[in-house]
Image (cartoon, helix red, strand yellow):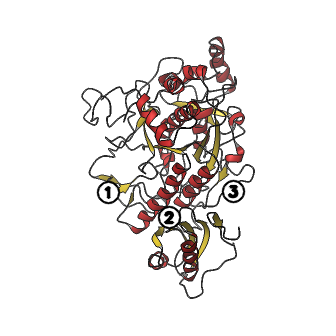
Amino acid sequence: MAHPRSRRARALALPLGLALTASLGFLPGAATAAPQDSAPAAAASTNGPLLSYVVNTTPDHATVGQVQKAITKAGGKVIVAHERIGVIVVHSANPDFAKTIRTVPGVQSAGASRTAPLKASGTTDIGKPQKIDRLSKSQLRSVATAAKANGEEPLEPLQWDLPAIKADQAAKVNPGSRNVTVGIIDTGVDDTHPDLKANFSAKQSANCVGGVADTSKGAWRPWDPDEDYHGTHVAGTIAAARNGVGVAGVAPGVKISAIKVSEPKTSLFYAESVVCAFVFAADHGIAVTNNSYYVDPWMFNCKDDADQAAIIDAVGRAAKYAQGKGVLNVAAAGNSNLDLAADKLTDSGSPNDSTPVERTISPKTCWDVPTQLPGTVTVSATGVHKAKSFYSNYGLGQIDVAAPGGDSKQVPELPAKNGNILSTVPGGDWAFLAGTSMATPHVAGVAALLKSTHPKSSPQEIQWLLKQQADNPGCPTGDATCTGTKQINSHYGYGIVNALDAVKS
């Protein structure tokens, strides 16, 4: 299993017999970066660790400007101000910064977005994902021979997940529109991969790490191709081209973009980066975002904690802004086999950027972000036999739809003989992975097909269609964890998404 932090923990890399595994200036309404030479006020304390904060204000020009002045007086340095949503990203070494800034008129919430100092974040090794084995050329040739005879992509015989949601049939009707882009908020995407480069949109890609979008060439690529394979794998499931090279995506005709939010070395997904990502997606014509992660360092952010409440507020504002701009946000439910509708849950992995402390939380007041934000499509994972994957979180009223995410305990027939999801990884290779991280891009792909078929539909309408067209297997006999009805239940929500219905609707 991959390391238990950000939603790279939602991807389980598992080996298999085939050796595959798994402006300067303040413009009204704009997100403005602060001058890099601005210094904290001399009167403020700087004896604490240098942390990053999100300060959430009334979203208007005058208030944001006044709060920025107060931030400087309190020993903070403004990194970027998203005026449209009233979110300001700040760095400060004043241990009383948050407490002080919360008293400023116009500030509605404020808190640290991390527990580890900025100088340590991104350099401290707190666990790495396991290395994955790549498919050799000889293995590729052996599988490709049979595929060619059937008119399939070379590795398509290993993709049991495509027929599971009728994506193979859907591609023959409508592979998706080039006017639709899915933004992959993740660890970056290797846009040079032969299965991805034809569909990759560089002009809609960026590196949002730290909270300011960097759109320079290649900034969106993974920090380390051997470790940061997650976003590239997600990309292939969504829109790997049908080009006779490797695998096929659910929506092989749409475009994909990368919005990198993972810190280097630790691959943590902090609030300031995710806020930047949602705002960037909203302002760059992206139709769907794929979110296979949770916002670190807290698996669940509790509203009765001032810092965590500020994280919910900041990311929630950004996600809502994106939705208002026509973006549908799709997110993974998680890999801990938790009932997200339970009264109480145990979180023993937070904060994951310093020393975790076991705590009992209530999902009603402590949210998995962005998964449980209003308007987000929450996705659970299934295996080849359509049963909920053993690791997948679930919950009546919490799961919207389900999709193939892989399950080593549900094994398909030959030639695949592997229950996980095959997709692209950096370096022009392919690998099997499992997790709700892998289920989510199937839903994002189907959502992209729906947007292609109904280009004027709102995010709410696309979500409604996803649910209406989903096929619900119903609760398995004797499984007490599955509650609800044949139409809506805790394992599948409204059901497993259907790509064919999406292009025929």
The quarter of the picture where residue 303 lies is: bottom left
Q: CA distance from mark 1 to mark 3?
A: 36 Å
Count all numbered tags in the image, as a single digit: 3
Q: Secondary structure at mark 3?
A: loop
Closer-to-camera residue (438/182):
182
The label number, if any, that marks residue 214 in the structure image: 3
At label 3, counting other C-alpha atoms closer than 10 Å, the crowd grade (few under 14, some 14-19, many 20 or more) is: some
**Which label lies toward us, 3 or 2?**
3
Q: Secondary structure at mark 1?
A: strand
At which x and y percent is residue 397?
33, 42
Closer-to-camera residue (323/476):
323
Residue lying at the far bottom in this picture: please name it.
43
What amino acid is labelled 1 in the image? Ile
Closer-to-camera residue (383/61):
61
Q: Secondary structure at mark 2?
A: loop
Who comes first in sequence, dot 3 or dot 2? 2
What amino acid is labelled 3 in the image? Asp
The quarter of the picture where residue 268 lies is: bottom right
Q: CA distance from mark 2 to mark 1?
A: 19 Å
At which x and y percent is residue 120?
57, 65
The label number, if any, that marks residue 259 in the structure image: none
Q: Which residue is mark 2?
A: 113
Q: Is residue 98 visible?
A: yes
- Tell me whether the residue at label 3 lies in contact with that at label 2, contact meaning CB atoms closer than 8 angstroms: no
The quarter of the picture where residue 351 lies is: bottom left
Who comes first in sequence, dot 1 or dot 3? 3
Q: Which residue is mark 1?
A: 361
Q: Residue at x 45, y 30 (%)?
A: 497
